[in-house]
Amino acid sequence: MSRHLWVRFPRTIDPAELPGLLADGLPAPLPGAVVAPLDACRRLRGPFTATGQLVRALAPGASAALVERHQVELLSTAPELRAAVDLPRETLTSLAVPAERTRFYSGVRTQRLGHGVVEFVHARLRELGGGPRSLVVRVVDADHTDLEFLAALVRRTDPALLTVVVCDSGEDPGGPLTGVLREHADEIPVPAPPPAPSGLDDLAAATRYVDGDCAVDLPELVAAYHRLPEHVRAELHDRRADALTAGGEPTHALGAVPLHRERGTDPRGAGLEALDEAINHCVDMGFYHATVDFGLRGRALLDPAESFGRWWVFSTKMTTSLLMLRRAGEAEAIYDELIALTDLPRAHMQAAYARAMIHTRHRERRDHLRAKGLIKQAIAFSRLLADEGDNQVFSTVFHQNGLALVEMHLGNLEEALRLVTEGAAWLDRTIEPGTHALHRSVLVHNRAQLLAKLGRTDEALECFDQVIAADPNHPDHYIDRGNLLHALGRDAEALADYDTAIRLGPPFPEAQYNRAELLLDLDEVDAALAVLDHVLDLDPDMVDARVNRAGIHLDRGDLTRARADAEHGLAIDPDNAHLHLVVAQVLAEEDAHAAATAAFDRALAADPDLLGALVGRAASAHELGDNPAALADLDRAVALAPDDPAVRFNRALLHEAAARWDNALADLVVAAESAPDDEDVTSALDRCRTAVCR
């Protein structure tokens, strides 16, 4: 197969029908199946339903090294494999009890997990050998996590290794998958005659529907289900939930179990308990789309007038998730609703803090002053509460840390540092050692970042060392320390930190990009190019990586690849000066100097001080015979970089051509001081000195 397949069925399809329908409806036979057809319906196992099913099928028998490399991804998508992993890598974030959870995963973590599973699948297929294979997946009602994984799998997988066959029921799968399928898959409508009647009575048909976890809405089964009395349906759901719970597979608690408990005989008891378990797991794991869904379902079963505390918990887990998904407006609307329904000081305290974070961190247009006022409100509310020992101390320190973030955003770095340092010392003084380990590490990490911003780099490194000692499996700490080490010129240590960050977690485009920049600084261009290729395989829209890779291609004379990277980047960031510069330089290399000049103009409109664009436009102006324009650009370039030998040399050539020998000589003297071994500069300097002496 040369392309992946996007199969469009005209009706709901049972996964059991897929092999026969595909065999009859596809123009060519599929390669051998790597596993049986997968069903991504989130009613089955919630987030990563299909991904986890694939992982559970491929992980047994995988090499120990492969499992170790991808253990975070494997255990996150298929926690049933935990017994097969000897020593899971835990972090303070993953170990924190709910009451001490003050740091949450990034909104893109699930995307990174999906990429890690893609790389696991590729490596596992190489271990298995045996030629091309196929993977058939039904994507009706899939969770966002499965859509992310399948999008990455389709985009990053050679169909000659694994042909991915994505099947829907006529509606686009949505999320990131639809666009990837349009670009990387052949869309094929496949007919599906109506299924033969089952011959089952209503109870048997409804039982089949419920025992399939209501994942496949075949009309005959759904109609039979709805013809049964409500109490009979509820009893069917109870029995199915009991059976799944007895099976002990954790992921059923994220999909089918809460579904059946909600529809069973005790939705406000067992149903809410199941939703509690599911929402807590999902918010802790960063499965934020599912958290929002569970929050809505939990709130629908509660009356805030009777159960405000529980309703608050479902609501605030939703707001946390919405903020991580960059949906700040929706989160803020929920907080408006929450504070309108209560006069409890603790609720208003928590809402004020959360809204402060929205204004200083999450809104597209930040308002740090308003955030500071809201933080002060939270502190004021906390003082109204009765002293509750350690909880009161922690609450005060937590709020001070938020205030420190606002002060940092306002440019008050010393005050931010004072708040963080004072908070950490207060925790150490007053709260039992071993408690709130996560937030203690957050405070030390924040102190390290502030010290680095203040130029107190030795102290900052000491703090980074402390937080890494306390939380050695958290990749972000190594990236931050690596960035500081790189800024200090300690590149070998920085590279080691980047390598550790990459090893500890699922694929991390930012860590890889930082590593590529460092390799470029070390003039290890081949290694940097390989890393940038991987970065853009993970995230094709990372503009900075496009800029750097385009520059490498340009330096190597590969104009086609340079232009392709620049044009892709400009489609995302149309005002990027560096990408316009690459296009201009490509055009100049092709002797299209009029078009190059227009592209240089666009680069300089975006960044008037972009030295390369000024020098390049000057060169094109010279080729077009407009030396006054060329000289004006080089005058500006010299003003920006008076000691740059190339700029001085280029301006000297213009002066020499116009017999302005003194001006040429002055530029060449400066150029020679910076580049004494440059033969072109030396030769021009000799010519000008001869001319001046005539």
Image (spheres, rainbow, N blue to C red):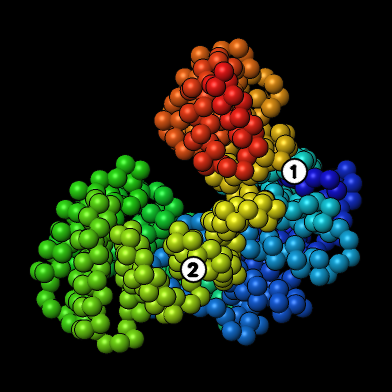
Which residue is rendered at x = 56% and y = 34% of the image?
646
Q: Residue at x 54, y 45 (%)?
A: 544
Quadrant including the C terminus: top right
Residue 605 location, x and y as percent?
45, 25
Residue at horizontal 49 percent and vertical 61 percent from the top:
489
The answer to whether residue 389 of the structure is visible from this angle is yes
Query: Circle 1 sits in a helix, a strand or a loop, which is it?
Result: strand
Residue type pointed to by label 2: Tyr
Query: Who comes first in sequence, dot 1 or dot 2?
Result: 1
Q: Which residue is mark 1?
A: 185
Q: Residues within 10 Å of mark 1 (few under 14, many from 20)?
A: many
Where is 451 relative to 668, above or below?
Answer: below
Q: Residue at x 35, y 62 (%)?
A: 452
Q: Position of residue 441 (x, y in %)?
A: 36, 74
Q: Position of residue 677 (x, y in %)?
A: 62, 43
SS at mark 2 in the image: helix
Which amino acid type is shown beneath numbered disc 1?
Ala
Asked if residue 179 is positioned above or below residue 351 in the image, the reply reads above
Residue lying at the far top in this picture: please name it.
625
Check if mark 1's residue and mark 2's residue have beta carbons within 8 Å.
Answer: no
Report which residue position mark 2 lands on.
478
Camera-side residue of 63 and 545? 545
Counting from the top left corner in percent of width and height, residue 353 is at 24, 60
